[in-house]
Amino acid sequence: MTLKNTSRVAALVAAAAAALLSASATAQATKLKVGLMLPYTGTFAALGVAIENGFRLNVAEQGGKLAGREIEFVKVDDESDPAKATDNVNKLIKRDNVDVIVGTVHSGVAMAMAKAAKDNGTMLIVPNAGADAVTGPMCANHIFRSSFSNWQPGYAMGEVVAKKGHKKVVTITWKYAAGDESVKGFREAFEKGGGQVVKELSLPFPGVEFQALLTEIASIKPDAVYTFFAGGGAVKFVKDYAAAGLKKTIPLYGAGFLTDGTLEAQGADADGLLTTLHYGDSLETPRDKAFRLEYVKAYRLQPDVYAVQGYDAAQMLAIGLKAVNGDISKKADFAAAVEKAKIDSPRGAFTLGKSHNPVQDIYLRQVVGKENKVIGVASKSLADPGRGCRM
Ligand code: PHB
């Protein structure tokens, strides 16, 4: 190479470096647009609020900025309505040009969001919805989950109920992805452990007309019942189960959403219930104590699993963002950083599996008063199998 060429190359390199620096400086200077797509009305309204609260608490703890970038929120109420999901998510992506989407609660809505995120290459962090497909066939290097897969709490409870020696179980849930997959996970472990699911009962989401189904359970007389309900529907189900006289005769087990964020409203009807979940109210670790103190200070409310998942979504975003100096367009580097991180969650530190779903302890909890008291670990470091994910 001639001297002239060498200096031309050097000049080009310097110019490119300057352009890169200024791009990253611009990225740093502008606000990071976070699209919050959550339910603010309907049976999951309280869950959406808790997720947003948790997310905002973590941002506040980081001085109101993530990796040096201020945050601008754009909010959409998805109403937990899959029929409106594609339009809603496209508003965030195409009209508002958000940098990252955080959402949602409902599995059917989340699947539409994952599809749009894939089609448009938009970063997505799912702070609740357990749809197995999101970290299964729909997985992508820019899609992450800070919560769980529907399979996880179901599978853990299947093992618990089998170990208790129950043989015949009836399941009852809403007929949609979350209910179906929670029951499937339960069934997989329960039948492996020698039990049998004798009947799968369901009703359309978000229906709460449980009476006919409770009558059917009473006539089948199974050894136990396994259920997935959440939010307002879970409150009504637990109350109706007790009112029907079933609580005294047929033990009820659930994925922990049945009693999370719901105990004030369920009162004594929830007392004693056993559930499995990746969080509980009595972990008594310094990390969780600090989180709970700050949450109560900020919102005058007790946190629940949804608040934790929102909090951790912000932690994951911050980890990725720091690794790319605030430039979220660098998806591969963002993903690499989150993949190797240990996320310091109030639930206990966790890592992400290959399909970007948390590998985490699933606790066995029992309702005591207004608390989901942790009485053991049902499944240690449980990883979703990530079936169908190729990344
Ligand atoms: C879901 O639809 O995936 C879902 C909804 C509410 C929960 C948990 C899972 O509490």
Image: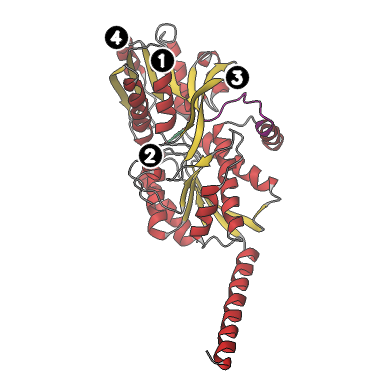
The answer to which of marks 1 and 3 sits earlier in the sequence is 1
Give the CA separation, mark 2 to mark 4: 33 Å
Q: Secondary structure at mark 1?
A: helix
Give the CA separation, mark 1 to mark 4: 25 Å
Quadrant field for ligand 1: top left
Q: Position of residue 352 (x, y in %)?
A: 49, 43
Mark nearer the viewer, 1 or 3 = 1
Q: Are marks 2 and 4 in contact (CB under 8 Å)?
A: no
The answer to which of marks 2 and 4 sits earlier in the sequence is 2
Q: Secondary structure at mark 3?
A: loop
Q: Which residue is mark 3?
A: 370
Q: Is residue 229 at least partly visible in the picture?
A: no
Q: Secondary structure at mark 4?
A: helix
Q: Which residue is mark 4?
A: 219
Splitting the image into 4 quarters, where does residue 305 fall? top right
Give the magenta-colored segment's residue range: 278-288
Q: Are marks 1 and 3 in contact (CB under 8 Å)?
A: no
Q: Which residue is mark 2?
A: 132
The answer to which of marks 1 and 4 sits earlier in the sequence is 1
Mark nearer the viewer, 1 or 4 = 1
Q: Secondary structure at mark 2?
A: helix
Residue 163 numbered tag: 1
Q: Amino acid at mark 1?
A: Lys
Splitting the image into 4 quarters, where does residue 289 fall? top right
